[in-house]
Amino acid sequence: MEHTWRWFGPNDPITLDDIRQTGATGIVTALHEIPNGETWPCEAIAERKRLIEAAGLNWSVVESVPVHEDIKKASGDCDTYIANYQQTLRNLAAYGIDVVCYNFMPVLDWTRTDLAWPLPTGGTALRFDQTAFAAFDLYLLERPGAERDYDAAERDAALRYLETLDETARQRLIDTIIAGLPGAEEHYTLARFRQVIAEYTEIDATRLRDNLGHFLSAIVPVAEEVGIRLAIHPDDPPRSLFGLPRVISTPDDVQWILDAAPSPANGLTFCTGSLGISEAIDLVAMGQRFAERIHFTHLRATQREEDPRSFHEAAHLDGDVDMVGVMQVLIDEEHRRERDGGPRLPLRPDHGHHLLDDLNRESRPGYPLIGRLKGLAELRGMETAIKQLCT
């Protein structure tokens, strides 16, 4: 398998020289500076590829080409943005980039309530706390109708939690949820956030799924024509937030997506952390079910807490994910592809604890240097051991 590393471009405090020392050979990146919906110019793609290759690395995966909200809502300039997306795929393919990860989560990308939750070991982790989230939704955002999503005990717990926060902590919670985490391209104020949520009032899961199907019908033929494999990322967390619909949260959701556009170009980003949040999902069985359509893999572990809706990022070999079982599935699929002449299978360590010097250096939340280096080293060691035992 190809070992990759997410890099946020020339402004990332973790440099390509740093990445080359981790053992990764592939880069996962995007042109984050280009506004959502606009076509990525060939010149910008060529320059980003030049930077990566000059460092002795390979641009392996695009993560992500963002899907504009008008496409998700099938409104406004939807057709224009789809045409721009198609052209971006053509431009990427012209430079040999053949895997594109994307998501179809309305309004927000992945969501957390704490970016530096203290660990017993002294490091910090990303965390989603259901009570903190409810406090934000009910009493800071004051979303109309939010009270219907929480019972009386949950509303009381959220209010008690809010009363423990001073103004600085309240603002930190607001910023953590809506200011945009790494990889997110949109950043909101509270007022704007209320407005964009309200734009989904008439869009339920069925309609959002229909809109996704329309998008797939337009872009999958282009991807197939130019040799790009599309890899949709599951919802994170895999359930509704803020009353917004979710349509990529279960194995059955993934099956619907693959059936909606039955092409090898239409596939999955198998994110073990996002999917592992759900108690109902058997990741090993899911990996076996969709192995041929897994085009990209995020390997990380999440740990559910006493309230299973709350979770934190665990170390890569801990938490609720059977990482050994998942790795065995991926190795089996890699062997099948080698035998049948199939495409490579890139993986990357996703997220990571902030450890040691990570605590004193600038890096994006969830994307530290040492924490991800530790995760990648553990995953590479596991992969090597399983391969040797299987020979």
Image (cartoon, rainbow, N blue to C red):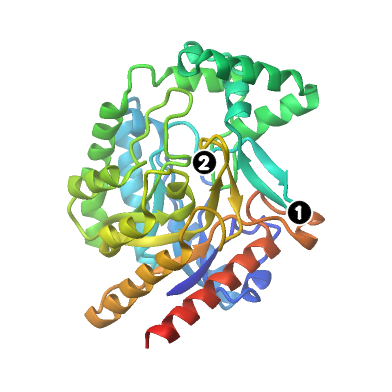
83 horizontally vs 12: left or right: left
* Secondary-structure class at tag 2: loop
Tell me, for residue 362, which label it has, or none: 1
Q: Which residue is the site of mark 2? A: 110
* Secondary-structure class at tag 1: loop
Residue 228 at least partly seen: no
The three-letter code of the residue at mark 2 reads: Trp
> 294 or 28, which lies in front?
294
> 103 or 120, which lies in front?
120
How many tags in the picture? 2
Name which of mark 1 and mark 2 comes first in the sequence: 2
Q: Give the residue drawn at x 40%, y 61%.
A: 296
> 363 or 166, which lies in front?
166
**Which of the two discs, 1 and 2, sits closer to the camera?**
2
Q: Give the residue drawn at x 47%, y 63%.
A: 323
Residue 334 at least partly seen: yes
Q: Give the residue drawn at x 28%, y 76%.
A: 337
The quadrant of the rendering that contains the N terminus is bottom left
> 183 or 11, which lies in front?
183
Find residue 52 and report its horizontal and vertical position in percent: 56, 69
Q: Residue 312 occupies which quadrant of the picture?
A: top right
Find residue 229 and report its horizontal and vertical position in percent: 31, 60
